[in-house]
Image: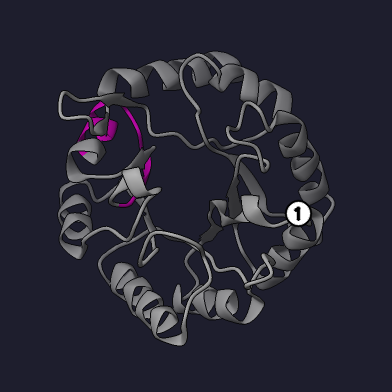
């Protein structure tokens, strides 16, 4: 469950989630969360697996040296505060995986699982990118298959999952983008994915979106029925 606030994370736990992606500013497609939020969640729910998004600003994924250093420090801080995994990534101005920078980010994670986020969807040659990330030791890729939603990207997601299975170091392909109680079963069945990513959010009166425990339960029930 992708959680953009403490309230969303608490709702995800209430709904039965045992793994979250913690970030802030979901309206900006997610930014690095506060260290305080991570510490409170880890202290309150020591068994909750918290994957921490590291993204220092909104916009494109090409970073300056100073920004890379900030990301490395944020990763180290998250690791020390109890993160279970890191979600991050970087691209070159040409839109390919920035191999030197991504290598540094993976190394900063200190052996924790590393997810390359949806910047992957902007890469033109996804086969090459998958192979590169496998070589770097990336554990999973969050992707909609290059489409606006995971449901629209089912065909590409299925291809990526099949390709990854043939690699020497397979990478988990995790569909994300527009996943909800109505389409999660179809996405799982038609892609063969073993993991899935969604916010299970509802609109609040102030226009913000927040994870809802009932939506989390509905998605988990769909997954349980699918796996059963």
Q: Report the front residue among 179 and 47.
A: 179
> In the image, is residue 157 above or below residue 105?
above
Please name the residue shown 47% across and 66% down the image. Answer: 112
Please name the residue shown 61% across and 63% down the image. Answer: 138
For the rendered model, the colour scheme is one colour
Image-quadrant location for residue 199: top left
Residue 185 location in percent, x, y? 58, 18
Position of 85 with respect to 227 (left or right) is left
Question: Do we see residue 193 in this rendering?
Answer: yes
Residue 153 location in percent, x, y? 68, 33
Position of 166 with respect to 115 (left or right) is right
Q: Which residues are magenta?
A: 10-23
Residue 81 location in percent, x, y? 25, 67
Residue 182 forms part of the magenta stretch: no
> In the image, is residue 82 above or below residue 201?
below
Image-quadrant location for residue 133: bottom right
Position of 200 with respect to 130 (left or right) is left
Question: Do we see residue 228 in this rendering?
Answer: no
Q: Indicate the quadrant containing the N terminus: top left, top right, bottom left or bottom right.
A: top left
Please name the residue shown 51% across and 65% down the image. Answer: 61
> In the image, is residue 225 above or below residue 195?
above
Q: Report the front residue among 100 and 195.
A: 100
Please name the residue shown 55% across and 22% down the image. Answer: 184
Position of 157 with respect to 10 (left or right) is right
Count of numbered badges drawn on the protein: 1
Residue 54 location in percent, x, y? 39, 64
The kind of secondary structure element at disc 1 is helix
> In the image, is residue 36 above or below residue 106?
above
Q: Indicate the quadrant containing the C terminus: top left, top right, bottom left or bottom right.
A: top right
Instruction: Name the residue beneath numbered marker 1.
Output: 126
Q: Residues within 10 Å of mark 1 (few under 14, many from 20)?
A: some
């Amino acid at each position: 469950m992708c959680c953009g606030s403490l309230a969303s994370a608490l709702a995800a736990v209430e709904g039965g989630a045992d793994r979250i992606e913690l970030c802030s500013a979901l309206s900006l497609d997610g930014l690095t969360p506060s260290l305080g939020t991570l510490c409170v969640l880890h202290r309150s729910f020591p068994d909750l697996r918290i994957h921490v998004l590291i993204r220092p600003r909104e916009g494109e994924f090409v970073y300056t040296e100073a920004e890379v250093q900030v990301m490395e420090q944020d990763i180290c801080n998250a690791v020390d505060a109890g993160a279970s995994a890191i979600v991050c990534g970087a691209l070159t101005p040409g839109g390919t995986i920035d191999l030197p920078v991504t290598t540094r980010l993976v190394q900063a994670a200190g052996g924790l699982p590393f997810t390359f986020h949806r910047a992957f969807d902007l890469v033109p040659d996804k086969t090459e990118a998958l192979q590169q990330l496998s070589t770097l030791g990336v554990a999973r890729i969050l992707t909609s298959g290059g489409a606006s939603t995971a449901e629209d990207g089912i065909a590409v997601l299925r291809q990526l999952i099949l390709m990854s299975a043939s690699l020497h170091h397979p990478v988990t392909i995790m569909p994300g983008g527009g996943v909800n109680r109505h389409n999660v079963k179809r996405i799982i069945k038609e892609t063969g994915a073993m993991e899935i990513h969604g916010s299970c959010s509802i609109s609040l009166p102030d226009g913000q979106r927040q994870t809802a425990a009932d939506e989390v339960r509905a998605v988990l029930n769909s997954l349980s029925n699918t796996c059963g």
